[in-house]
Amino acid sequence: MEVAIYNINGAKTERKVKLNKAVFGIAPNDHAIYLDVKQFMANNRQGTHATLEVSMLSGSTRKLHRQKGTGGSRKGSIKNPIFRGGARTFGPQPRDYYFKLNKKLKRLARISALSYKAKENGLTIVEDFSFDTPKTRNFIELLKNFEVEGKNILLVTNDADQNLVLSARNLEKVKVMNAADLNTYEILKAARLLITESSLKEIEKVSKN
């Protein structure tokens, strides 16, 4: 699949690049994508939620009334879960949501997501560029040139260009990411991928590992 290369002004150049079919042209595996995104979100959960159980709650332990013969339910103390302000039954406790996935499955999920983007024309190849100084205004101008203002945008670069990262830092729906760190979740979250020309080889390299 051949796609045009654009310059920083959003204009199509005369040059084209051939996308690797093994990375951008496979039949996507939806289940692999599901598992990879599920793992990404689970591993980012803090898991610090907690509720008070009977043993953790402060309060009187006096038995409210005799066990039988009252016609009412049995109540151990004022800390019983049936009372307002009482303990919680089977409430959440701190836990780790982390789980592992096979590397081959994660690779399949990543190239499946890239293939979806290529099929839906959701990616644009841009000539390598940089900013002399970190300015948000410059990045906003770039978005206007590609007519993607207000959308979730992922700019994929070959190296960590600090000027680009700092220029996009204050833009809520924009993220700059190194090609080596590319993951399925960020690919699918973005409405459009802006991929620098030099990062294509790095994406292919990462997708083979």
Image (cartoon, grey):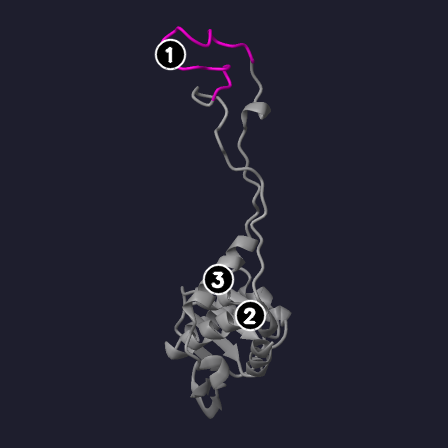
Q: Which circle marks residue 35 in the picture?
A: 3
Upstream in the sequence, badge 3 or badge 1?
3
Three-letter residue code for mark 1: Gly
Up-down relation of residue 99 to residue 107 (above or below): above
According to the image, label 2 marks what residue? 182
Q: Is residue 107 left or right of residue 188?
A: right
Is 106 included in the stretch rendered in magenta?
no
Name the front one of labels 2 and 1: 1
Name the front one of labels 3 and 2. Answer: 3
Disc 2 crowd, CA 10 A, few/some/many (<14, 14-19, 20+): some
Q: Residue at x 56, y 69 (%)?
A: 177
Badge 1 is on which residue?
Answer: 72
Q: CA distance from mark 3 to mark 1?
A: 49 Å
First in residue order: circle 2 vs circle 1: 1
Residue 130 sits in which quadrant? bottom right
First in sequence: mark 3 or mark 2? 3
